[in-house]
Image: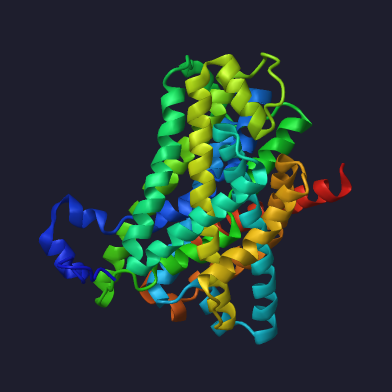
Amino acid sequence: MTTTGDRPQTITEIRERGGWRSRLIFFGPAFVAAIAYVDPGNFATNFSAGAQFGYLLLWVIVAANLLAMLIQTLSAKLGMATGRNLPEMCREQFPRPVTRLMWVQAELVAVATDLAEVIGGAIALNLLFGIPLFTGGVITGLVAFALLALQNKGFRPFELAIAGLFCVILLGFLTTAFRIDVGGADLAAGLVPRFDGTDSLLLATGILGATVMPHVIYLHSALTQGRIPAVGVEERKFLLRRQQTDVLVGMGLAGVVNGAMLVIAAALFFGTGIPDTDTLEGVHAGLARALDQPAALAFALALLASGFASSGVGTYAGQVVMQGFIRRSIPLLARRLLTLVPALIVLGVGFDPTRALVLSQVVLSFGIPFALVPLVLLTRRSDIMAELVNRRSTTILASLAAATIIGLNAFLIVRAVTGA
């Protein structure tokens, strides 16, 4: 709730006060959730797509972003309508053995999530300062812990810190994108749905299939539950409209970041023969070679901000999952160590970090149905959502989106297991 100092505590007071600062009070949750869509895994995938196929798969990023907007809107709406988050609602509505299974898989997802984020932060620190990967992983974990400590001062400081890191990512890529020559005709052609062989289809599947991350679906509902109290139908609908705007802006900017990654790679790497652009280290070196050192620096800083922010958000999601599914919580430091240790082991034994990123995305894929299916089932029920229940068209669209994402992730899992 907005209870700090003389800040308004109800929607009526916020609307009466007016002004741009009052409007900004409604923004924040979607920017925290948007970090999951610009995490280190997205860096490697988007740059690889641009380097291999130019602007061909730009439309896939746009489609993926639209799916993200729909899913995150449903999650935000569930928290507002019920005052409870998705794990809590699952515990209330589903049999206990089912929720126990959901909790176990969600904890595995949390570990896989942190693996990708910590590795991304460690690589960024190595690129910027030459810090060994293991030490960089420890630093990333400590920074994430510091970010989470901001929650002791209320929801706003944490949201502002994450939004600030998000801006670093956004500016890092926009400053580079504006420096390169991008033809309008090429961009327009990239928005036309098409493929160029099996490899492009597989990469498109990777972009689309890894769009919606289960941990951020759980988290978004927690970020909106009881955040600003709404009294009566009119206020609840007003708050929903504001949260829809929050999602539109937050996820829209995440889409801009992802699009900028692909555009930069297409303009600088496609057809040039610059090697290793499917790894984060290779992209950094390639930017310095194809453009200049400032471009490489902007990439490394953006990667660092992504690793720090997404690691903090992932740990926060882990707390929500445990407390929601089994009504248990552990000290924040213990939670941080629980998900950090596997990442440090991977870095310590010298496992290829980019390969570890890819494998973590496969693990995350297993968690998609456990988050998406309950979300659609719950938000379609009027006895739970009241006046905020999904329209029939929304449920149909969300069901199709869920089926598409689950199908694509299943395809990726089969490819990863069989090596076909």
- Quarter of the image with the C terminus in it: top right
Residue 151 drawn above or below residue 303: below
Residue 409 drawn above or below residue 177: below
Q: 322 left or right of 171?
A: right
Seen at 61% across and 65% down, the residue is 337
Q: 388 left or right of 90?
A: left
Q: Quick one: 158 or 133, which is closer to the camera?
A: 133
Q: Position of residue 331 (x, y in %)?
A: 53, 74
Q: Position of residue 183 (x, y in %)?
A: 48, 15
- Name which quarter of the figure residue 227 lies in: bottom left
Residue 71, visible in the rendered structure = no
Q: Quick one: 272 or 374, which is closer to the camera?
A: 272
Q: 344 left or right of 33?
A: right
Q: Position of residue 209 (x, y in %)?
A: 65, 48
Residue 179, visible in the rendered structure = yes
Q: Quick one: 154 or 380, which is closer to the camera?
A: 154
Q: Position of residue 203 (x, y in %)?
A: 70, 36
